[in-house]
Amino acid sequence: MPFTPSEIAQTERQSIRTQIRQARRALTAEQQSTYATQAAKLMLTQPKILEAKHLALYLSNDGELDTAPLIQALWALGIKLYLPRLHPFSQGNLIFMAYTPETEMLKNSYGIAEPKLDIRGLIPSEKLDVIITPLVAFDTQGNRMGMGGGYYDRTLASHRSQDKPYPVGYAHDCQQLDSLPCEHWDVPLPLLITPTQVLKFNI
Ligand SMILES: Nc1nc2c(c(=O)[nH]1)N(C=O)[C@@H](CNc1ccc(C(=O)N[C@@H](CCC(=O)O)C(=O)O)cc1)CN2
Ligand SMILES: Nc1ncnc2c1ncn2[C@@H]1O[C@H](COP(=O)(O)OP(=O)(O)OP(=O)(O)O)[C@@H](O)[C@H]1O
């Protein structure tokens, strides 16, 4: 057999990534700004978010839905925020670090700003109430696909049977597909917010 089913699925996932990353990068600065405000407003209607004490999110990159207005609103509400940082030696894993307006930031190997390593800012992921995850594509069943590093899949896999951290997807409407080719390690999302939709899934 020239290609195994798993190789075909991988190629399909890669081509979806390329297509959707291109679509979100093509959004104008004005669209990005409007969508970021709309999505933040919808996010702030959600009890899971408003009740969170410790919440992880991400700093936008590569056309991702901009979290800047959401960050300002959550700080104003007194919710403690955290950002992912590539694990300093365990490849493919993330650690989460406190994020305040004073946090010293450095760029990681992907060019994404992350908090400078400082053990005082570390939080074990099981202490997070919510993790807002970036993603490349999602479907109508709540399946998510990321940049391909498996970082969030690994983080979420270790908490699957617990009720926290509660994962929430945050993405543009143009990142939605009818159905994604899934792998057994993909962790589906119970809640997904876009600039125009609050999607809840029974999973
Ligand atoms: N904003 C944001 N932060 C995040 C993520 C994310 O998806 N978005 N991550 C979610 O996992 C982690 C970083 N994972 C990433 C994985 C791949 C690439 C990426 O650009 N890959 C390039 C190849 C780069 C290279 O190898 O040099 C590519 O696919 O073109 C970026 C981030 C942690 N922080
Ligand atoms: N729980 C896990 N434990 C070990 N390896 C994993 C786990 N989840 C995913 N992986 C590995 O990570 C690689 C990338 O997975 P995948 O393409 O699904 O990433 P992704 O969902 O796009 O990325 P991310 O989760 O960072 O957003 C795969 O080779 C997969 O085997």
Image: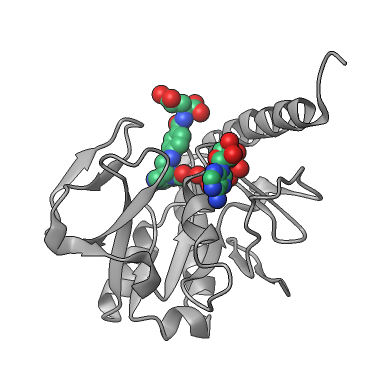
User: Looking at the picture, does residue 70 appear above or below residue 63?
Assistant: below
User: Looking at the picture, does residue 190 appear above or below residue 57?
Assistant: below
Rendered location of residue 120, percent (x, y): 12, 63
Please identify the quadrant where the C terminus is shown. bottom right
Count up the numbered dots: 0
In this rendering, would 16 be left or right of 154? right
Rendered location of residue 33, percent (x, y): 44, 52
User: Looking at the picture, does residue 40 appear above or below residue 53?
Assistant: above
The residue lying at 40 percent from left, 46 percent from top is 93
Is 6 in front, or is 48?
6
* The furthest residue to the top: 2
The residue lying at 35 percent from left, 57 percent from top is 68
Quadrant containing ligand 2: top right
Is 115 in front, or is 158?
158
Rendered location of residue 142, percent (x, y): 70, 61
User: Looking at the picture, does residue 52 appear above or below residue 170?
Assistant: below
Is 201 in front, or is 185?
185
The residue lying at 58 percent from left, 73 percent from top is 161
Please identify the quadrant where the N terminus is shown. top right
* The furthest residue to the right: 1
